[in-house]
Amino acid sequence: TRTWNAVCSVASLRRGIALARDYAGRRFAFGATLAEKPLHVDTLAGMQARGEGIPKDAGKAESLYKKACNANHAPACLELSRLEKTDEAVKLLDRACTIGSGESCGLLAARYQAGDGVERNLTRAAEIHQKACDGGWGQSCLALGALLHDGRGVPKDVAKANALYAKACEA
């Protein structure tokens, strides 16, 4: 009975995904099919990468993430940066940060702070942490506060550091 239930569950999930893909190719919204929308493509890429309802395939997931990233979908650029080598990952994080992803800005700033894939530059790290903090990424508020508290890469400002620590707690 358990085997039968497992087989039926997988078959139903595959059928559901097949129907969703077919529907996405036929349904027009805002001048394009759903299959052409970056959020939809990003969702499919995530399912492909994790093997949710479809066989796990990193190559297909990567191509779907690239398609969504090329359409300026920041979360896809972020996920793609996690699959890429260091140089390409930095470019993707920069792109996602420019689009407005606070998490991507925070990860990019951390790379500048540590010198991971880029030349270490605490001033640049502080600038990017500020953008990420303004975007609601609490970890960057904390990191920028530490840089300001110690005066690393930026002028020392304990009062501003304390305000950023409080903001990090609220984020």
Image: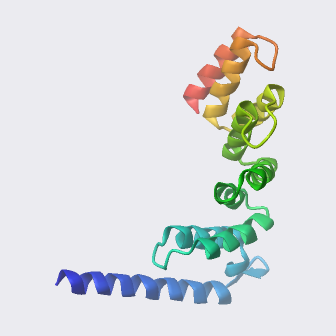
Left or right: 15 as drawn, with respect to 101: left
Q: Quadrant of the N terminus?
A: bottom left
Q: Quadrant of residue 151?
A: top right
Q: Residue at x 75, y 64 (%)?
A: 69
Instruction: Identify whether 98 is placed above or below 128.
Output: below
Who's the residue at 73% across and 68% down the image?
A: 66
Occupied quadrant, residue 115 = top right
Frontmost residue, 111 versus 154: 111
Q: Name the image colouring.
A: rainbow
Front-most of residues 90 and 95: 90
**Residue 124: which quarter of the image?**
top right
Total residue callouts: 0
Q: Is residue 4 left or right of residue 140?
A: left
Residue 43 image position (x, y, % from top left): 59, 69
Q: Position of residue 75 (x, y in %)?
A: 67, 57
Vertical placement of residue 49 versus 153, above or below = below
Return the x and y of residue 145 as percentages of the image width and height. Answer: 68, 20
Q: Classify 91 as above or below 19.
A: above
**Residue at left 45%, top 77%?**
53
Q: Can you say whether 21 is above or below 157 in the image?
A: below
Q: How far across and how far down the image is residue 129, in percent?
A: 73, 32
Of the 4 image quadrants, the one containing the C terminus is: top right
